[in-house]
Image: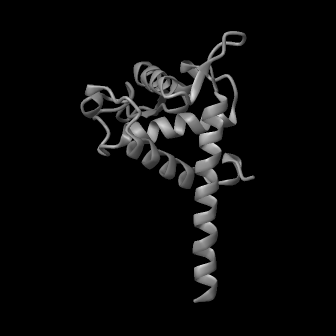
């Protein structure tokens, strides 16, 4: 059975974020349209569905690397800050955004707290859902490849 590792990150994140949006289970905070995603940013994201995309990316990251906490996700989603004519430096992403995404994914049962090692880990139900989405993405890619070969 195909897993998340067998699918490209871009395809999986796009499919899982659209699944999260369609299901309506993911609780989205009211401030998502005005919040910056890090201190190195000047504006809020242009994409209205950025919260779903970030949640899908976080779920995939935790699926691939067990026991991930807020600090690791801050580093992952950080970026370089423009300092004018001085060299750019790395700034971590917003801890509040990462924490709220983890809490939202916990509420729908994708993640669970790891009390032994700290951080979050993927739950059994979450792993099954992510593998199901990955299988659907892989089947879609195979059917597109078959259509291109037959044409």
Query: Which residue corresponds to the image point at 50% horizontal and 52% vertical from the top-left?
Result: 15
Q: Left or right: 37 with respect to 6?
A: left
- Give the vertical position of 72 relative to 135 (above or below): above
Q: Between residues 74 and 42, which one lies in front from this camera angle? A: 74
Q: Between residues 36 and 51, which one lies in front from this camera angle? A: 51
Percent position of residue 54, x then y: 45, 37
Q: Between residues 11 and 112, which one lies in front from this camera angle? A: 112
Percent position of residue 29, x then y: 31, 26
Query: Which residue corresponds to the image point at 67% horizontal and 22% vertical from the top-left?
Result: 67
Q: Left or right: 85 with respect to 119?
A: left
- How many circles with numbers are drawn on the protein? 0
Percent position of residue 122, x then y: 64, 29
Residue ranking furthest to the right: 1
| Snapshot colouring | one colour
- Give the vertical position of 69 relative to 21 (above or below): above
Residue ranking furthest to the top: 115
Percent position of residue 105, x then y: 49, 28
Query: Which residue corresponds to the image point at 24% horizontal and 30% vertical from the top-left?
Result: 34
Q: Between residues 30 and 112, which one lies in front from this camera angle? A: 112
- Give the vertical position of 118 relative to 150 (above or below): above
- Give the vertical position of 10 relative to 87 (above or below): below
Query: Which residue corresponds to the image point at 41% horizontal and 42% vertical from the top-left?
Result: 23
Quadrant including the C terminus = bottom right
């Amino acid at each position: 059975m195909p897993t998340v590792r067998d699918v490209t990150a871009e395809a999986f994140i796009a499919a899982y974020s659209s699944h999260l949006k369609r299901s309506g289970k993911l609780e989205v905070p009211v401030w998502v349209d005005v919040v910056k995603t890090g201190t190195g940013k000047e504006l809020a994201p242009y994409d209205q569905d950025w919260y779903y995309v970030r949640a899908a990316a976080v779920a995939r990251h935790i699926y691939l690397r067990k026991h991930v906490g807020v600090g690791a996700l801050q580093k992952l989603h950080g970026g370089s800050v423009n300092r004018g004519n001085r060299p750019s430096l790395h700034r971590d992403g917003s801890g509040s955004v990462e924490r709220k995404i983890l809490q939202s994914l916990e509420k729908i049962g994708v993640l669970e707290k790891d009390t032994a090692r700290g951080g979050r880990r993927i739950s059994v139900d979450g792993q099954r859902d992510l593998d199901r989405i990955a299988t659907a993405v892989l089947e879609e890619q195979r059917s597109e490849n078959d259509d291109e070969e037959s044409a």
